[in-house]
Image (tube, coloured by chain):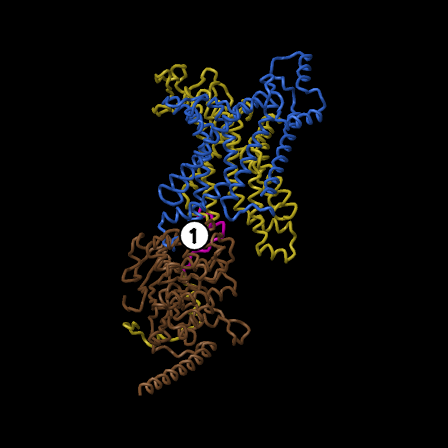
Amino acid sequence: MVKYLAKRIFYIILTLFIVATVTFFLMKIMPGTPFANQQKLPPAQQAQLAAQYGLNKPVWEQYLLYLVGLLHGNFGVSYQFSNQPVSYLIGSRIWVSIQLGAEAMVVGVLLGLIIGAIGAIRAGSWVDTSATIVSILGVSIPSFVLAVLLQVYIGLDTRILPIAGWGGFEYTILPMLALAAQPLAETARFMRTEMVDVLNSDYIELAKAKGLSKYGVIYHHALRNSLIPIVTIVGPLAVNIMTGSMVVENIFSIPGIGDQFVKSIMTNDYPTIMGLTIVYCLMLCVVLLITDILYGIIDPRIRITDSK
Amino acid sequence: MADNSKQFSADDFDLLNQNDRSKLDDEKIAAPSLTFLQDSWRRLRKNKAAMIALVLLVILFVLSFGSGLLPLSPYNYQYSNYTNLPPKIPGIDINGFNGTIMQGGVRVNAYVQNHVPSNVYFLLGTDGLGRDLFARILYGTRISLTIAVVASFFDLAFGVVYGIISGWIGGRTDTIMQRIIEILLSIPNLVVMILFLVVLKPGLLPIILAIALTSWINMARLVRAETLELKEQEFVLAARTLGESSFKIAFKHLLPNLSSIIIINLMFTIPGAIFFEAFLAWIGIGVPSPAASLGTLISDGQKNFQFLPYQMWYPALVLVIIMLAFNILGDGLRDAFDPRSRR
Amino acid sequence: MENKDDVLEVRNLKINFKTYAGDVKAIRDVSFDLKKGETLAIVGESGSGKTVTTRSIMGLLANNAVVAGGKIEFHDQNLLKLGRKQMDGIRGRDIAEIFQDPMTSLDPTMKICRQIAEPLIIHKGMKREKAMAQALEMMKLVGIEDAEHRINNYPHQFSGGMRQRIVIAIALVNRPEILIADEPTTALDVTIQAQILRLMKELQEKINTSIIFITHDLGVVAGMADRVAVMYAGKIVEYGTVDEIFYNPKHPYTWGLLSSMPTLDTKSETLPSIPGTPPDLLDPPKGDAFAARNKYALKIDTEKQPPFFKVSPTHYAATWLLDPKAPKVTPPEQIIERQKHFAQLTKKTQKQNLNKHINEQEEQL
């Protein structure tokens, strides 16, 4: 187990190193200077700015400095929010995104599991059909469309919930719904297929032959066996939520890293883009690691052994 | 127990000769035997939702790619006097299609207000620059579909080749190729696309490349898994013992058997690509103006959504219909190709 | 019940499956009895309806199956008429089943002691502790070594043969009156097959259960069954005691099955097989379903289905060849050998009976 963990962590560090390197050199080959979209500056002042940000040094030196900085949690200084360290920008916003993302994940996965399970149990009935329609709609409506619809038709028209900003729990409801729709739909589809498979398996037949009632079979045998593989889609769902958060946070004016990422793209704020890229990768790596370990714990067939 | 109620003549108890017996077999009406594709097509045809999706997609493809033949104003022509006109379809007097719109809580006829001649109308209205939205949506659909389909074929080509190589060669090559995929999987693909576009400046080709660059992984994994399974099967072994070259086996025996899984995955890759294209456009790195895709149209429409809802509703509707149709068709194809996965 | 020795009586069972192409008549008028403590083997090719028959007894037919007629009597109730709840109460308590593939028939995520104890908890309302203790006893009974240490293991930690033992333990833990074994050894290695069969025989004596043994392998039947029913295309074509079926078969299909089974005295180099394939049950033939593959088919076979002809009080066969008007045919060589053997066998038993009779008389004197 320790060996497995060490190996995984090594891969995470390797991944982050590759990502950092690639983003760094991508940003270096960008045409134009980072200050182009600010007011026209005289060349002397530009040179001074370049020196201030260390842009006059050779590229390899900048690269080494950048890597050393990363090790200390230093992502450099934002070009746009002058003198604000990128790590501060991210640090002050990341918890907002994590809270919103976690809420959306929990709500989406839970509702998705319920809808998927009901669909599988009543396979072929109208309940199944409507569950399928809900999940296909959920997959097909982009989060930015859903977010705008929710904001205008629920937020503005009913005025029950706040339509923008960040405050108490009520501020999270609409953006959370917009974010949760896709995970919900994906989970429901996955759960339905898994459970239909399980319900057709031999061991369910044996459970029925034991004399378990229909719901006994589902509760004692079908549910657990179809729930376990759900862990494998948590990673992709996390990606989904990260992607969605960029637009949803933007639409609902939520001060999270997704909103920051979009703003940085618009303003060519390279250090922030690079920093956020690394943070997104790190978050995904951690989620994947946790789910893999979790999978090993809950599925007796998979024991993480050192031989792997 | 013997039931001898009806007496038969002694003649009935003669032995049946060979010919009569084989006739018995011929007369047997069996279910028609179908090839794999015929059988899949029969199953697909029985799936009403998938057939509707297929028809919708055909209509959308024909309309958007044949829009040049329709008597429409060009997508980028600006009627500078006719900005923000709501939809008007002559002969229909339903709010939303009669040229009226709510302004400050009062329904007014925007066409009368703007002194538009009665023979001029816009089926889906105009945008803030006075461009015909119907023409723009058709054009945007064409761009979106082009990007999605081309990107998907790129990723198909790359993903399939990568998957086959990794699965077929196996051993250390496979291990290394899988490690690469594992690393790529732990990078959110949208981040990669965005970085790529920030560097390359948005345009049709960079967007296609950016999407293809990130979405082949899924295809590669599926194809590899299937290849590993097929590799062990007897028909491949038979081909090997007959001395066929590895390359030939891969193309003659593997590819046909992989086709269903590739087609199904393609059906799910395309809506994914459409979504990514719209997403990139929405955050401002889509095809540059005056060209338009569904994503840029939605993004433009969203700014005035509260007052001119039709400007976002229609492109969004088309986008959702395309995504729905591909998803439903993909589901239908999966069920048709793999009867085991059916309920 | 027509006969008080019977635990189960199946009468005129007809089952259809609805498919896109029409109704598949999977079971076409099947009747048989199961006597207390006996083993009845049902033999036939795949698709002959063996499994569907047992599924209907268990009340576990697929959703598209329709019972078109007949009844299944058990303890003076018709199982086909019982509600879902009542059927749940019988399944696993009075009638249990063992499935074909032990690799897939155990829940992969549940500890095996729990799986064995489950029927006790459901039907006897036993407390967990007590049920677990009994499950452990059962594990020892079916011959799982080191059972105490293995009760908390999961199915994947056992070999195929061990898993089938666990499945048997689950089926027998409530000491059911009827055990249905649906090809219980087909998925196992030949050496393991014999062990499992021996185990089933032993346990049958210990808990006095009746077994319906489904198989396509006549070799397995010989050592296992008391009586045999041969099924073809959704019908029983011949039934009798194991000796009668093996050594004095009357139906050409049974001849075919027996000839295609290798024996130690098989002389010829090729093993005979039955030509052709079973008929399409979407549209079953009007006459004898086997006629098209039958070298001995009569004209009447194309017109009318043969009734059962009595061969002995325990032996019936549905073939027109047994009609007095039918021509004499010579069965395959191998079958003639078998019939000779049977004649000797019956002579011997008759002599034995006679001796016994005389002895008894002498004792009485």
The reply to whether residue B65 is visible in this rendering is no
Magenta span: B29-43
Q: Secondary structure at mark 1?
A: helix
What is the x, y in percent for residue A236? Answer: 52, 37
The reply to whether residue C121 is visible in this rendering is yes
| Left/right of residue A271 with respect to residue A135 in the rendered view | right
Q: Give the class, few, some or many, for how many residues have Cα within 10 Å of label 1's Cα (few <14, many ≥20).
A: many
In front of the other: C51 or B306: C51
Q: Which chain gets the brown colouring?
A: C
Chain B rendered in what hue?
Answer: yellow
What is the x, y in percent for residue B115? Answer: 40, 14
Question: Could you tell me which residue is drawn at 42 percent across and 51 percent down?
Answer: A204
Q: Chain of mark 1?
A: C
Amino acid on which disc 1 is placed: Arg
Question: Could you tell me which residue is drawn at 68 percent across and 14 percent down?
Answer: A48
What is the x, y in percent for residue B197? Answer: 59, 27
Instruction: Relative to B216, say whether C336 is above or below.
Output: below
Q: Quadrant of residue B89?
A: top left
Q: Which chain gets the blue colouring?
A: A
| Left/right of residue C109 with respect to residue A81 in the rendered view | left
In front of the other: C115 or B265: C115
Q: Quadrant of residue A149?
A: top left
Residue at which label 1 appears: C114
Taking the magenta stretch, the answer to whether it contains residue C214 is no
Instruction: Relative to C146, say whether B198 is above or below.
Output: above
